[in-house]
Image (spheres, rainbow, N blue to C red):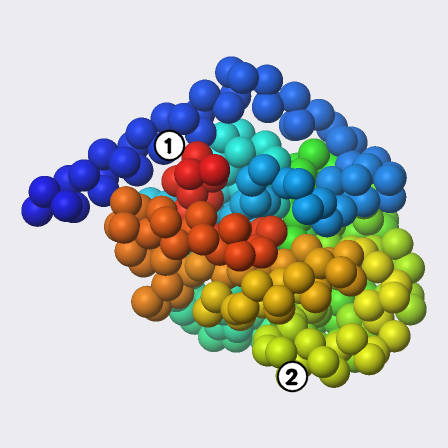
Amino acid sequence: MKKRRKARVLGIVCYCFALLGLVSGESVAQAVDRFKDSKTIDDFLQYRSDRKRPFILAHRGGPGASDTENSIPTFNQTASVLPNAILEMDVRITRDSNYVLLHDPTLDRESNATGPVAEWSLPDLKKIFLNDLSGKRTQQRMPTFDEVLDWNKNRYVLALDVKPGTDPIKVMDKVLKHRAEYSVFVICYSVAEAQRMRDRFPLLWLAVGVNSMADLDRFEKEKLPATGRLIALTPQKLQPATFYERLHKLGMLCSVGTYGANQLDEKPLEEAAAGYRELFRQGGDIITTDRPKEVAPLF
């Protein structure tokens, strides 16, 4: 009981320190068109061996139990506290070829409707309500990708998880219409998909999975690493330091997820704090977490 109480106190203290970031001057990062050209995002995401703290990537925006995932209110809440956080979101296509944000392929868990998102039209999707993380219905509507880009105005870096069945090239065409290509990176599901994106968008940042030493051996022989502007999505299990060192030699940031069953995000913060710090010491440059506001003040 005392251990749980101490963990809650630590979480509150960490959250308060995160809020102090707004007063300390970090909030200037929220300027419109902060990421206005390739140099701006290149400088932001470039690998640096002397980095003092990791990037924090807010998985699905970083919602709490009473928040909705993949929603503008949650993005805004996270970004207002952590203006340098990367906001991750899931992009899916609708029946009428529009784009909305939803993690699951079906509506069942995240809304008061059911069935595959791809079988719904946008006008009908706009009539349903989102559930919060605890499953309670809210009064929030599902955001379109256009609405999120309009909200962002190139203020924060958005990590686009373009879900299977949705063409990332067409999603990027939408990004280009908003002149937002320098405030996003695209998560790719294979090296082949990443190469296809690189051929089409030479200046775009891409994230691609590198899941083992054997995988890294193969990846180093591809032509993709030489093109730069790459982020490695590495295993949740901590790898040998040489694994991260080899990726760093390619100029790649290493992202490590801490969400999901039996992972650090599921443990009391006091118990997990050393694990987050060890990930960074070992070579993880980006911590992808469900609790960004609590993890960030640990560094």
Q: Quadrant of residue 233?
A: bottom right
Name the residue carrying label 1: 15
From the viewer's side, name the closer residue of 154 and 241: 241
Query: Disc 2 residue type?
Result: Ala
Q: Is residue 3 visible?
A: yes
Instruction: Please tell me whether residue 103 is drawn above or below residue 59 in the rendered image.
Output: below
User: Where is 115 relative to 267, above or below?
Assistant: below
Residue appearing at x 45%, y 21% in the figure: 20
How many C-alpha atoms fall within 10 Å of the one at disc 1: few (<14), some, or many (≥20)?
some
Give coordinates of residue 169: x percent, y percent: 81, 66
Q: Is residue 248 left or right of residue 53?
A: right
Identify the residue at horizontal 23%, vertical 34% (top origin). Answer: 9
Q: What is the number of the mark on residue 214?
A: 2
Residue 179 position within the rendered picture, expressed as x and y whole percent measured from the top left: 84, 43
Question: Dot 2: within a 10 Å radius of its alpha carbon, few (fewer than 14), some, or many (20 or more) residues?
Answer: few
Q: Amino acid at mark 1?
A: Tyr
Q: Residue at x 91, y 59 (%)?
A: 202
The label shown at residue 219 is none
